[in-house]
Image (cartoon, rainbow, N blue to C red):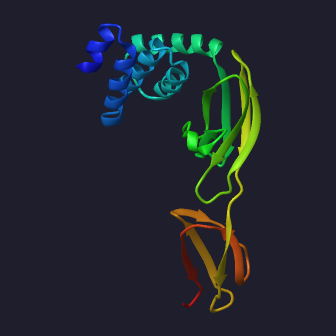
């Protein structure tokens, strides 16, 4: 009620704060849209773009909201400096310039930044961080692709009998381990190992 009352009175900054709180409590496509519109009207184009982008990824049967969001996105794309960030593997946390400034979400994602030179940083659990420099210009889309290298540890394996077959799952996902015995260099993580041999 507070958010809608402030919005009706043109107090868009106050309405934005209330809609952000509402979204944190009960996130939905509608709350994404409300935050985006208030941010746009409150002259917070970077925040408006971020929430419109998230809204467009969400399911919403309201065609009026969808059309309005597409129109607002088109306008913002011509006004903002955008960076399209992808990583391998996906799901890396994106920060710009300094990690203490907060996250811009996870890859793949298009983010809005101030025009000029920036450092884009991608971090992911179990991987070394990756970073690159990009020059962003207003009304244009820069593209960034980052590869994160796995942090490796040693897994010591002794098979008895020697010809036993070793299978491994890493955090629920089947993985191929290097052949042989002794110290195997593998990405860090929690593994479940299954060793099988005929007659055993």
Residue 112 occupies which quadrant of the picture?
A: top right
* Residue drawn at (62%, 49%) of the image: 123
Q: Position of residue 191 (x, y in %)?
A: 55, 71
Quarter of the figure that contains the C terminus: bottom right
Vertical order, 8 against 107 (above or below) = above
Left or right: 96, with 169 as reference point: right
- One can see residue 50 in this view: yes
Vertical order, 127 against 116 (above or below) = below
Q: Position of residue 19 (x, y in %)?
A: 34, 24
Residue 6 occupies which quadrant of the picture?
A: top left
Vertical order, 108 against 58 (above or below) = below
Camera-nearest residue between 10 and 51: 10
Q: Position of residue 165 (x, y in %)?
A: 63, 80
Vertical order, 29 against 103 (above or below) = above
Left or right: 35, with 120 as reference point: left
Left or right: 151, with 173 as reference point: right
């Amino acid at each position: 009620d507070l958010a809608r009352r402030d919005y009706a009175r043109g107090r868009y900054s106050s309405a934005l704060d209330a809609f952000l709180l509402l979204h944190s409590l009960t996130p939905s496509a509608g709350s994404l849209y409300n935050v985006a519109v208030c941010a746009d009207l409150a002259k917070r184009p970077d925040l408006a773009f971020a929430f419109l982008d998230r809204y467009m990824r969400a399911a919403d049967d309201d065609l009026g909201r969808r059309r309005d969001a597409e129109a607002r996105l088109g306008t913002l794309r011509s006004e903002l400096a955008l960076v399209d960030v992808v990583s391998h593997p996906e799901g890396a946390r994106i920060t710009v310039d300094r990690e203490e400034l907060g996250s811009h979400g996870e890859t793949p994602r298009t983010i809005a930044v101030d025009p000029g030179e920036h450092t884009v940083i991608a971090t992911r659990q179990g991987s070394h961080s990756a970073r690159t420099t990009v020059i962003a210009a207003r009304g244009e889309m820069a593209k960034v692709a980052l590869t994160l290298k796995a942090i490796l540890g040693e897994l010591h394996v002794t098979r008895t009998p020697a010809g036993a077959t070793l299978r491994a799952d890493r955090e629920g996902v089947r993985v191929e381990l290097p052949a042989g015995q002794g110290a195997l260099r593998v990405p860090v993580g929690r593994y479940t190992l299954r060793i099988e041999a005929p007659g055993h």
